[in-house]
Image: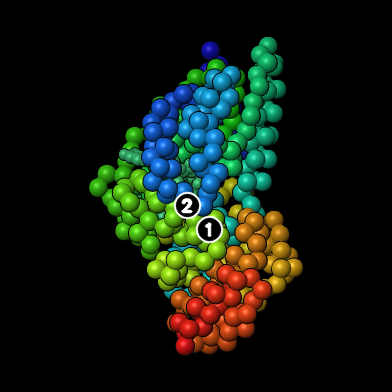
Amino acid sequence: MGTALKEALVKRALEEGFVSCRICRPWDVPQVPGRLAAFIEAEYHGQMGWMAERTHWRGDPALLWPEARSVIMLAESYAPEVDPMEILAHRDRGAISVYAQNKDYHDLVKKRLKRLARWLIAEAEKQGMTPEVKVFVDTAPVPEKALGQAAGLGWMGKHSNLVSRDWGNWAFLGSVFTTLDLPVDEAEPDRCGSCRSCLDACPTDAFVAPYQLDARRCISYLTIEHKGPVDEELRSKLGNHIYGCDDCLAACPWNKFAVAASDMRYAAREELKAPKLAELATLDNAEFRAMFSGSPIKRIGRDRFVRNVLYAIGNSGDNRLRPVAQTLANDFDATVAEAARWAAQRLG
Ligand code: B12
Ligand code: SF4
Ligand code: SF4
């Protein structure tokens, strides 16, 4: 039952711009509660206190919405046009992770998911069914990677993100939960083999073991989620990463199968490809908000962003940037001021 509807759904999802669409049951991820509990117990979540809340839902999608019978998992490519590692050699410039160089994916993926869900309801109703749907992307307590693996979108690689033989690892995940009983797909087996490129690429040694990340050491966490000063041992390893990090993703050999992003709104904005640290450091609140309007970067605010820029200045080895750091040594934000003094001292 539902085979024709599923085939039409997959076709529709690809037309919508998703790179893959596969289905599993909400109860197909029995390994997650134990692993999530271990992650929280070890405090790998750091300041992301929300991860330790609603763990019954985050661990078990069958509890999140008990009426749901199928989870439609979708992947949307945001593959970069240039090698994201190139910018790391230009120490007077800031490296912004690929996913954040233009529009916020949460908005774009959610709109696409909603359109697909509306289409599904209309098609099902034509066949006399009255399904309910809920769409999720990133922010809900849904274990998206584990569901993606169960549905066969790809497997959870040693860097802990989903990798596919068809599109590598440059893809966002989203889901449509539905009360419809749709036919499921097979889970994807692990194809990492003896490879460990992603583990070796990590500048901060954030992997405690293959597949296991201590988020507190991850540059993505440190530059986006972590409030206040970053430990000195870690800040010197941030290099010129000022928002997120792609080093482990860029190392994955499966990216030779990457598929170009279908939505041009992920393509890097010219001014965010290699922004000058000296210019970013002096942004005030209004300038920061104007520059990052519609971007995921806006969420972290001027102070945390300038803190990151100052760490990058401190790591630049470029003495010409010292006066820029000095001008912020008495900033009204204590963390920015401390970062500025640290950077100036390092360059001195
Ligand atoms: C919290 C979070 C983060 C945290 C923690 C990341 C993490 N790996 O947990 C931080 C801020 C560090 C982060 C960073 C990034 N994130 Co993030 N993040 C999330 C979020 C909101 C929840 C993830 C979560 O629950 N983590 C908790 C742990 C327990 O879960 P887990 O990693 O799934 O843990 C599994 C493994 O540890 C594994 N495991 C443990 N032991 C073992 C042993 C074996 C043998 C195996 C096989 C597995 C295994 O099982 C666990 C349970 O499934 C998801 C969205 C969502 N709702 O799922 C996005 C999400 C994972 N992030 C995403 C992205 C794109 C990123 C970044 C690339 C962004 C960037 N460029 O800076 C980086 C990548 C860093 C990295 N190497 O993971 C995408 C990943 C897409 C994909 N292809 O997989 C997601 C799915 C968002 C989305 N909707 O697209 N993120
Ligand atoms: S995103 Fe960067 S810091 Fe985080 S695990 Fe990957 S390589 Fe390490
Ligand atoms: S780089 Fe290698 S080990 Fe890491 S996810 Fe890709 S295939 Fe797996």
x, y percent for residue 186: 40, 26
Q: Secondary structure at mark 2?
A: loop
| Residue at figure coordinates x 42%, y 66% from the top left | 234
How crowded pointer 2 is (Cα within 10 Å; few <14, some 14-19, many 20+) is rated as: some
* Left or right of residue 127: residue 60: left
Instruction: Out of 75 and 42, give the one closest to the viewer.
Output: 42
**Among all residues in the image, which is located at the extreme left?**
194
| Residue at figure coordinates x 45%, y 30% from the top left | 151
Q: Quadrant of ligand 2?
A: bottom left
x, y percent for residue 301: 65, 62
Q: Is residue 24 above or below residue 226?
A: above
Q: Which of the 4 image quarters holds residue 65? A: top right
Q: Is residue 79 visible?
A: no
Disc 2: residue Cβ within 8 A of ligand 1's nearest atom: no
x, y percent for residue 296: 63, 55
Residue under numbered circle 1: 226
Answer whether labels 2 and 1 touch (C-beta < 8 Å): yes
What is the C-alpha distance between the residues marked 2 and 1? 8 Å
Q: Secondary structure at mark 1?
A: loop
What amino acid type is highlighted by mark number 2? Gly
Q: Is residue 181 above or below residue 64?
A: above
Residue under numbered circle 2: 46
What amino acid type is highlighted by mark number 1? His
Instruction: Out of 3 and 60, give the one closest to the viewer.
Output: 60
**Looking at the image, is mark 2 or mark 1 earlier in the sequence?**
2
